[in-house]
Amino acid sequence: MQFEIRGRDINISQVLRGHIERRLRFALDRFAGRIRQVHVTLGDLNGPRGGIDKCCKLAISLDRPSTIVVESHASNVYAAIDCAADKAATYICRRLKRSNGRNPLRRISELLRQESTIVVGPTNLQPGGAP
């Protein structure tokens, strides 16, 4: 998994870069075999005026020819990164389950159908444990 980190109106320090990589590895590590590259763009929307204006945008390239884009806004850069990482993990998990056809409701109905076709032979239950 490769990271490309850019900042618009935000200085990307080594501490911030380390936090981004650590947080994204924690959130996306279980999908590492399917993720080629993660583009991270941090921005300050309002500039020096303040407010909820820090933005973290993730563009995640999967092994299939598809890209997932997640965006999060917060008053703090670190909070925006954390929220975007959580959103990305949830969305990738949902996307991969759909593509694999692993619908839990369908699996339960299939199990019930299989269970109804199982024939159990008669058992002889007598007191004392001997047949």
Image (cartoon, rainbow, N blue to C red):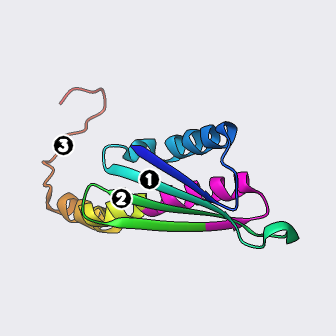
Q: Which residue is mark 3?
A: 123
Q: Which residue is mark 1?
A: 38
**Residue 102 percent coordinates (x, y):** 29, 61
State the image quarter where residue 87 is shown.
Answer: bottom right
Residue 80 placement, left or right of 71: right
Amino acid found under the numbered disc labelled 2: Ser
Q: Which mark is residue 61?
A: 2
Numbered disc 1: secondary structure? strand
State the image quarter where residue 117 is shown.
Answer: bottom left
Give the answer, above or below, for where 86 lies relative to 71: above
Tell me which numbered mark, 1 or 3, is placed earlier along the sequence.
1
State the image quarter where residue 52 is shown.
Answer: bottom right
Amino acid found under the numbered disc labelled 1: Val
- Which stretch is magenta? 72-91
C-alpha distance separating marks 1 and 3: 60 Å
Q: Are marks 2 and 1 in contact (CB under 8 Å)?
A: yes
On the question of residue 85 being in view, the answer is yes
Which of labels 2 and 3 is toward the front? 2
